[in-house]
Structure formats: C-alpha cells, structure tokens
Amino acid sequence: ARPPPGPAPPRPGGERAWARAGGGAVGAVGDELVAKIKERAEKITIGPGDDPASEMGPLITAAHRDKVASYVAGAAAQGAEVVLDGTGFTVEGYEDGHWIGISLLDRVHVDSDAYRDEIFGPVLCVLRVDSYDEGLALINASPYGNGTAVFTRDGGAARRFQLEVEAGMVGVNVPIPVPVGYHSFGGWKDSLFGDHHVYGNDGTHFYTRGKVVTTRWPDPAEAPAGVDLGFPRNH
C-alpha cells in the first residue's frame, strides 16, 4: 500500500537576470505613481511555477529570500518609506517554498543599501526628483549603465533622454528595454565586462574565428598558348 500523501514539496524557483529595480518619479506625479504601483502590485498572483494562474513564483533559495527580505527590513532605518512589505509571505499548501511577496519602497535615498545593491528580488525602489535634469543626473551618476527607461508623452523629452543618458540599453515607454536578438544585450560602465556584448553582431564577432585570405591571379588574357579560358588573348 502507498503511504498517505504528505505535504506538497516546494516548487523549485528560477531567477531572472533582469528586472526593473528602481524608478525615479519626477515632481508631483510621484504620489500618484506610487499609489498606482501599489494598487497593481497587490493584485499580482504569487504561486508555484506550474500553476498557470501564477504571475510570480518563489525565489531560488531560502538564503536568497532572507537576503532580499533584509533589504526591506532595513529600508525604513535608511530613510525609505515601506509602502508594501512582502516579507513573511507564504502560499497555502507550499509553506516550505522560498516565498516572498512584493515590496515597494518609496523616497529611497541614493546612499541606501536598497538602491546601491542589486537585490534580485521583487523589491521596487522609488526615488523622488524635482526635474528631468535631476533625474538624468541621478542615472548618469550611477557606476552601472545596463539599461534604463523613460515614460513620457513628450517626444522632445524622449529624444533628449535617449541621447543624454549613459546606459547601454534605453527604453522609451518600455519598462525593460532588452532589444531583439540581432541587437546586442548589455550595458555601459560597470555593467559590462570586456569589450563585447552578449549577442547580436558583437556575439557573432566574439564566437567567430576570423580568416584573412590574400590572393593574386595572373590576367587570364596572359594565359599560355594551348590554354583556353574563354577570355580574349593579347597574343
């Protein structure tokens, strides 16, 4: 006879290599923006990866879950407002999974751990700036330059941003500006190692061993007698 079924095993988690980690709210729009993000975040369904209804799964290890939670726990002490606290989240029937809910941190300072470190977890940091120029300076001051995005209805502002921002991938009204495959994925500054990106033309160059062949052939019109190459002869 089979033993009685025990608790469901935890589902393994994967880890995405890219996600939006921070956002800068310009001017008075910040309060409305944070409220909208909070409203949407609270509706996201978190569950096992094999459930089609799940929009977000667990983290990859318990140690990583605890590390992500530590940023949320320390955010208030470093001057941020914890709008949503996703720590302590569990999924019924899968209590042993490495779960964490979505956290939203507002008014984050540039010298806080949550802003300086790459968290790799569902934590969004919102920074407040008073103008476009201040927001641009904030981005360009970062030692990293993987990717960035601007959300605007002003084409002039979008054009200025894509030319002035120091990042390898830029989105205009696109939150995660990872380009299609024939363009290279990768950033600038400390977000790039080496002098080539991952794929696209750079990837082809990286994985290709070049061969240069230099040739020189005599003029077919100078072919010796008895050799007819179909070209006019000089003799």
Image (tube, helix red, strand yellow):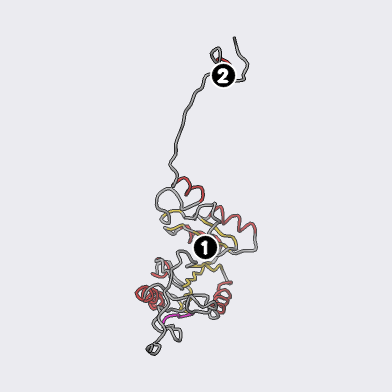
User: Which mark is on residue 147?
Assistant: none
Three-letter residue code for mark 1: Gly
Element on which disc 2 rests: helix
Three-letter residue code for mark 2: Pro
Q: Is residue 212 magenta?
A: no
Task: Give residue 103's position: percent from left, percent from top.
Answer: 47, 77
Q: What crowding class fits label 2: few (fewer than 14 Cα within 10 Å), some (14-19), or many (20 or more)? A: some
Residue that badge 2 annotates: 220
Of residue 99 and residue 142, the one placed in the foreground of this image is: 99
Question: In the rendered structure, which segment of residues is drawn in magenta?
Answer: 83-87
The earlier-in-sequence mark between 2 and 1 is 1
Element on which disc 1 rests: helix
Instruction: Give the position of the N terminus as an image quadrant.
Output: bottom left
Q: Residue furthest front?
A: 1
Q: Is residue 145 above or below residue 8?
A: above
Q: Is residue 40 left or right of residue 70?
A: right
For the residues carrying marks 2 and 1, which lies nearer the camera in this image? 2
User: Which mark is on residue 135?
Assistant: 1
The residues bearing labels 2 and 1 have C-alpha atoms spaced at a distance of 67 Å
Q: Is residue 86 magenta?
A: yes
Q: Is residue 94 above or below residue 21?
A: below
Task: Give residue 222's position: percent from left, percent from top.
Answer: 55, 14
Task: Give residue 202's position: percent from left, percent from top.
Answer: 48, 48
